[in-house]
Amino acid sequence: LLLLAATAARAGDARQEEAVRALARRLLGPRAAAVSLSVDPALAAGGPDIYRLWSPPGGAVAVAVTGSSGVAAAAGLYHYLRDFCGCHLSWSGAQLRLPEPLPRLRAEIRVAAPGRYRYYQNVCAQSYSSAWWDWARWEREIDWMALSGINLALAFAGQEAVWQRVYRNLGLNQSEIDKYFTGPAFLAWNRMGNLRRWAGPLPPAWHFKQLYLQYRIVERMRSLGMTTVLPAFAGHVPQGILRVFPRVNATRLGHWSHFDCSYSCIYLLDPEDPMFQVIGTLFLKELIKEFGTDHIYSADTFNEMTPLSSDPAYLSRVSNAVFRSMTGADPKAVWLMQGWLFQHQPDFWQPAQVRALLHGVPLSRMIVLDLFAESKPVYQWTESFYGQPFIWCMLHNFGGNHGLFGTVESINHGPFAARRFPNSTMVGTGLVPEGIEQNDMVYELMNELGWRQEPLDLPSWVTRYAERRYGAPNAAAASAWRLLLRSVYNCTGVCVNHNRSPLVRRPSLHMDTELWYNASDVYEAWRLLLSAGAELGSSPTFLYDLVDVTRQAAQQLVSDYYLSIRQAFQSHALPELLTAGGVLVYDLLPELDSLLSSHSLFLLGRWLESARAVATSDRDAEQYELNARNQVTLWGPSGNILDYANKQLGGLVLDYYAVRWSLFVSVLVESLNSGRPFHQDQFNQAVFQVERGFIYNKKRYPAVPAGDVMEISRKLFLKYYP
């Protein structure tokens, strides 16, 4: 038996070695031959991951990297590329101009992770960001995860196919299942028991394609030494269960957010009903049979939903029932739970209630994600989650919104303070944004901190970051980044990065224009980046950042014009209203749309075409496109969570945001001309038709950029720089 175990372990090491070498070949091409990569679990001696870098004698191999896992070896490779070759990899692009020859190290470098886990993914990102991904996009993401050292991640694709199989075996018919699942862009909230039916049903082809993706995702993650987190049963069931099992004890939850019971009010099984264990165990057994397991499972029973009772005994029974449904299928099960509920509804989740829910599960058989730890840490007021292990997470982004934002001081110190907390049960750090592909710098910083024993010198770090990102030192670009670091990226206190700029919100006379930073710092960073364009204009990551900073400056300018419009209206100054409104609607917003349309990563067409590309029929393509359009605008049939997932994309600014602003200015002008007061309710009814019209306009938006980024940004600068 010992021999068999040793043989299996060596096979696992070899699999991870081959996976990380294949990653290096994808990343570096033929230059990967100059890097030796190996995996040796003995390095970690059963503790957190370790990697070591050194340059062996002779000239063929410039650097050798050994990691205690495939992920650790990949993180070691990125350490070398980043710190010794000046390279950079992010969602918005790669800068991989390698020195010739590759530099050799003077001395061995050994890095040990301070905690067991570096976690990644928010369940919402499955809808806001990766809903339409194909395997090629997933492969790039998993490569980035490995190079970032992430070793614990959600693997949630394909679960509806397994659930459908379970429901059919239990006796539900297809129409009952179709009335339960949402459309693809809203599945995250169906999985958490918030939403049903909206934008559905799921076509059969969706299930087949998602199963195929999940096979490849879990195989690749595991081959690199990552632990995959699979979904588990949280207690929510379709209404059809009550038809098949009329004596089942299930209670209908209240409505979620601004949805009525047409699309929410999902049934929750009583934890002591025998069917809770039957359904939960049946699902997990089926899932494990399909995909194997790494023994960690995610389930969220009360995401933004008030439990039926605050009685601690009831809450313990619920969590114990969820956990037992896991161990019924996998005796080694560990429950990974998002800790969002504790800070989202603090009036309900008092210490007694939190303790009861957590202690319904044996200690160390649950890991809690302290989901918003950079702004609202829960571990501090729960005695480190009353003994359950937790991961200190940076949430950072809501709804996948665009907008420069960060809490760099908080994330630079928060994880270290959490480790020093009395009787701390912290077991790692995590990235849990609701949406990705924004603010690359913040995620690069957080990933680096996941391997550090102490905070970084941030101004020095961001100077090196700019040089790596653009592939060359540039004083103006470095100055721009230091300005951004101290201002827009350094929100302090309780900071919620949910873009509330008037640009992306339904117009009214009571809009929020407050900033947590000095607007002039962004304008100056804009000027500095533009001045660096002559030297750095050939860098794709520079062009992305120039669009992003120009976009932020334009967003600030929209607020200024809004304030002028409001002031003119309230002062009954029609000429000033016409001037400010005219500039906003007929120049600034169209120019911003042109800027966004000049870069492939800021195109509405890219989002819509990726949705259509998943479809296998015209009918499915239409449904998926409506899902994609609705999510970034109305978020529901009647603007239920209006503009929550707002994006600044070429096409969306001109045909959605600008049309709303045009109507708003027209209504204000008409009000002054006629002497009739402005009524927000009447405007809301009128503008809803505009918003809904955008979703159904059937216009095909380009997925290929048009125009010159530098030229358009400079034009905007010359017109609008304050």
Image (cartoon, helix red, strand yellow):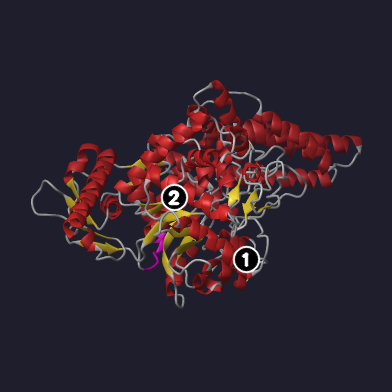
Residue that sits furthest to the top in the current view: 618
Q: Is residue 458 magenta?
A: yes
As shown in the figure, which amino acid type bears the numbered disc 1?
Answer: Tyr
- Residue 17 appears at what percent x and percent y? 22, 48
Q: Nearer the viewer, residue 24 or 635?
A: 635
Residue appearing at x 53%, y 72% in the figure: 380
Residue 222 shown left or right of residue 691 in the figure: left
> Label 1's element?
helix
Q: Which mark is residue 230?
A: 2
Residue that sits furthest to the right in the current view: 675
- Residue 273 appears at what percent x and percent y? 60, 57
Q: Nearer the viewer, residue 490 or 402?
A: 402
Residue appearing at x 63%, y 41% in the figure: 240
User: Is residue 453 in view?
Assistant: yes
Label 1 to label 2: alpha-carbon separation: 26 Å
- Residue 544 appears at what percent x and percent y? 46, 40
As shown in the figure, which amino acid type bears the numbered disc 2?
Answer: Leu
> Which residue does the numbered mark 1 point to in the structure image?
314
Residue appearing at x 76%, y 44% in the figure: 508
Mark 1 or 2: the one toward you: 1
Q: Residues within 10 Å of mark 2 (few under 14, many from 20)?
A: many
Residue that sits furthest to the left in the current view: 58
Q: Residues within 10 Å of mark 1 (few under 14, many from 20)?
A: many
Q: Which mark is residue 635?
A: none
The magenta stretch is 454-460
- For the N terminus, give its image quadrant: bottom left
Residue appearing at x 47%, y 67% in the figure: 414
- Give the quarter of the image for residue 21: top left
- Placement of 410 over or under 27, stated as above or below: below
Q: Nearer the viewer, residue 149 or 342?
A: 342
Q: Earlier in the sequence, mark 1 or mark 2?
A: 2
